[in-house]
């Protein structure tokens, strides 16, 4: 099931997903020591384009790809940025076309072996693949009761669907012709009002699955969340903890490629 192929889900995603990506782009810029912008970057699994927009900070030209036409319809159009409907495991670009390839909030849905092979094909020698994620910890600042409700009630009613959760490591990177440069963790905080948090939760794959498979209606879920949040929000808004990880890989250059670069 493609959880993000539905128009209503794409709309909720656009309205509610936190724009944390500039934080990560800044970390990428420092880690890779980018003194100037790279020429051509590819953002695989770009969704509604938040990650592609942020990527323009360090790339002259950006291509965002996603398998969901509905998500791409929500993506903003800007100069130097275009979108292509394509599977991350098979993208319609020439070999060695890109200086930087990123995957934001998407890698856990990919066929990893096929995607890593495709990333290796598309990158120029010694260029980079950066995979990063960002997740909701289910913790409200200064209110431990919310975490108890989130784990004990919300996730029991809407369990997370299966995904590839294992981290990238040196052995996996080497199998596909990459050098594993680093893994870097980070944290960020997002402030939600109750209705904003409800919309955010209904943009997650576990709730999308329940709605699109006909198990529950979106209206009933909103009503249930509103009742649950009433005693949990002590003020009109509250801060929530998010966390993430960034994996940095560099394509190994063959002796033939090194010679061509020289």
Image (spheres, grey):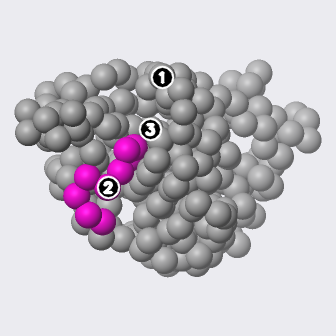
Q: Secondary structure at mark 1?
A: loop
Instruction: Classify residue 72 as left or right of residue 221.
Output: left
What residue is disc 3 on? 132
- Distance CA(mark 3)–CA(mark 2): 21 Å
**Callout 3 touching callout 2 (CB < 8 Å):** no
In the displayed orientation, state which residue is furthest to the right: 236
Q: Secondary structure at mark 2?
A: loop
- Residue under the image location 26 percent in, 52 percent down: 96
Where does the C terminus fall, quadrant-wise? top left
**Callout 3 touching callout 1 (CB < 8 Å):** no
Give how far across and how far down residue 205 sits, in percent: 48, 59
Q: Sequence-wise, which precedes: disc 2 or disc 1? A: 1
**Callout 2 touching callout 1 (CB < 8 Å):** no
- Dividing the picture into quadrants, the one containing residue 19 is top right
What residue is disc 2 on? 97
Q: Nearer the viewer, residue 198 or 84?
A: 84
Q: Sequence-wise, which precedes: disc 3 or disc 1? A: 1
Q: Nearer the viewer, residue 237 or 186?
A: 186
Classify mark 1: residues with Cα within 10 Å, few (<14), some (14-19) or many (20+): few
- Residue under the image location 70 percent in, 56 percent down: 16
Q: Nearer the viewer, residue 70 or 194?
A: 70
Residue 33: mark in rendering: 1
Q: Nearer the viewer, mark 3 or mark 2?
A: 2
Q: Sequence-wise, which precedes: disc 3 or disc 2? A: 2
- Part of the protein shown in magenta: 93-101
Give how far across and how far down residue 18 sits, in percent: 67, 46
């Amino acid at each position: 099931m493609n959880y993000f192929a539905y128009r209503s889900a794409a709309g909720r995603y656009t309205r509610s997903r936190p724009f944390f990506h500039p934080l990560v782009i800044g970390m990428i810029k420092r880690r890779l020591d980018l003194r100037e912008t790279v020429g051509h970057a590819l953002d695989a699994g770009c969704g509604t384009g938040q990650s592609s927009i942020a990527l323009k900070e360090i790339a002259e030209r950006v291509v965002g790809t996603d398998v969901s036409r509905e998500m791409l319809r929500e993506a903003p159009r800007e100069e130097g940025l275009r979108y292509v409907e394509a599977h991350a495991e098979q993208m319609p670009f020439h070999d060695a076309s890109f200086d930087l390839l990123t995957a934001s909030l998407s890698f856990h849905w990919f066929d990893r072996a096929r995607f890593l092979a495709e990333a290796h094909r598309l990158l120029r020698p010694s260029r980079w693949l950066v995979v990063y994620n960002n997740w909701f910890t289910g913790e409200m600042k200064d209110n431990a009761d919310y975490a108890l409700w989130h784990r004990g009630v919300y996730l029991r009613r809407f369990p997370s669907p299966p995904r590839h959760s294992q981290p990238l490591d040196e052995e996996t990177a080497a199998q596909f012709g990459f050098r594993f440069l680093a893994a870097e963790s980070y944290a960020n905080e997002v402030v939600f009002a109750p209705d904003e948090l409800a919309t955010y939760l209904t943009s997650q794959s576990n709730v999308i699955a329940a709605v699109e498979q006909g198990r529950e209606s979106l209206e009933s879920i909103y009503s249930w969340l509103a009742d649950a949040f009433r005693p949990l929000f002590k003020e009109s808004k509250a801060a929530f903890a998010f966390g993430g990880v960034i994996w940095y890989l560099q394509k190994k250059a063959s002796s033939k490629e090194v010679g061509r670069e020289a």
